[in-house]
Image (cartoon, rainbow, N blue to C red):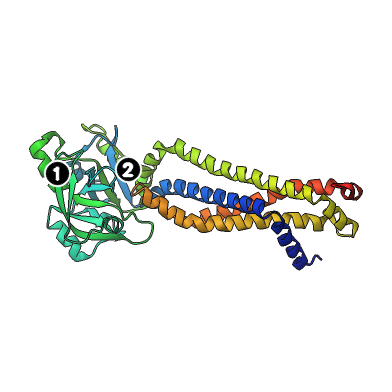
Amino acid sequence: MIDLGPVLHLILRNLARHRLRNLLTGLGIAVAILAFGLLRTLVDSWYAGAEIGSAGRLICRNDISLTFPLPVSYAASLRHIEGVRGVSWANWFGGIYIDEHQFFPQFAVDAATYFKLYPEYHVPAEQLRAFQHDRQAVIVGRKTARDYGWKIGDQVPLRGTIYPGNWSFRIAGIYQGKDGQVDESQFILHWDYVNDTIKQVLPDFADKVGIFVIAIDHPDQAGAVAARIDAHFRNSLAATRTETQKAFQLGFVAMVDTILIALQTVAYVVILIIMAVLANTMVMSARERVREYSALRALGFSPNFISLLILGESMLLAGLGAVLGILFTFPAASLFHHATGHLFAIFRVTPWTLCLQLLAAVLVGLTAALLPILSMRRVRISEGLRAMT
């Protein structure tokens, strides 16, 4: 049985021989693990909204495209379809706050019903009542309120893009999610207020909604209820397409699916590159120590002992780089999320990403040690002792 104490001592002494080379290799591993973690987090964040979509909610939109609205009068028919428990609606507002870079999602909703269908948005009762009784009032997510320093009673001016004009809204409430998976960046205003204003300037845009949000009695019947809804409006002026909230959000992800695949590919290429760098470092170290390894074998140490030295050095170097990379992943992710504003509703490093980072480090360490170990085991003791003389 091998005593690991002396082995560890030899490994540490070997690492200290070429400090600059090993330091640069370790930093390279750290940067690669950090980049891998950020790219994985970026990909996960695109899917995060779809993954948390409620199975008990359906989204109904125009069958042609989301850019084509539906008559608000459809709501009355939707409420009478079998399996439907509740109906609300929402429109994308698309206003500009200060400039185009100050982005946050804005939705004009039916104030009386919207929050009943989104119980994960927690709004104090008195704030919700204040919102419902003032058509110029809005409810904003905690994250957006924190980012802009808003508080209850503040006036927020927006410059309309889809709905022209200068708009001003009063913050009546701030919602927070039931957990860390809920989007806390939304700016929620009254559809009635927008609709009545638009009637005066763009009557053709009035009494239209972008989507209907539908609560159903039994999530396992989502497909059947969606089919009933679409069948009901099949011969109407605007046919519908109804799907689960998750499927609806995955439709947006599909628009950038090729980019996501490219990002995942780059993440794994980064690991392959750093694997080659570490392998080169280990091969150089092994060549420099051929004579020493041969001397150890001449003294009776087995090839397995020498292999353990090489493997331990490779794994320790990969492990130290991985720990450093993982530690810097969290502040790097936070800085990236801050820099991208509200592009990602949820941007956090998941436990699965951390596991993949550790697994990548282990794979790099093992693979980088393989070639020098095989080379060392092929060298005869006599040839090794004559080497580098």
In this picture, residue 70 sits left or right of residue 28: left
The answer to whether the residues at label 1 and label 2 have Cβ atoms under 8 Å apart is: no
The residue indicated by pointer 2 is 226
Task: Report the residue at 52% width, 53% height from top.
Answer: 353
Q: Position of residue 165 (x, y in %)?
A: 14, 41
Is residue 255 rendered to the left or right of residue 268? left
User: Which part of the image, by quadrant, shows the N terminus?
Assistant: bottom right
Can you give x and y, in whole percent of width and height, for residue 258 in the image? 46, 35
Residue under the image location 78 percent in, 49 percent down: 288
Under tag 1, what secondary structure? strand
Q: Which residue is mark 1?
A: 166
Decide if residue 82 is in sight here. no
In the picture shown, does residue 155 fall above or below 43? below
Q: Residue at 46% across / 53% down in the picture?
A: 332
Q: Secondary structure at mark 2?
A: helix
Q: Amino acid at mark 2?
A: Ala
Q: From the viewer's perspective, is 295 left or right of 360?
A: right
**Residue type, numbered disc 1:** Asn
Identify the mark nearer the N-term, 1 or 2.
Answer: 1
Left or right of 378 in this view: 96: left
Numbered circle sitting on residue 329: none
Neighbor class of circle 2 (other Cα within 10 Å; few <14, some 14-19, many 20+) is many
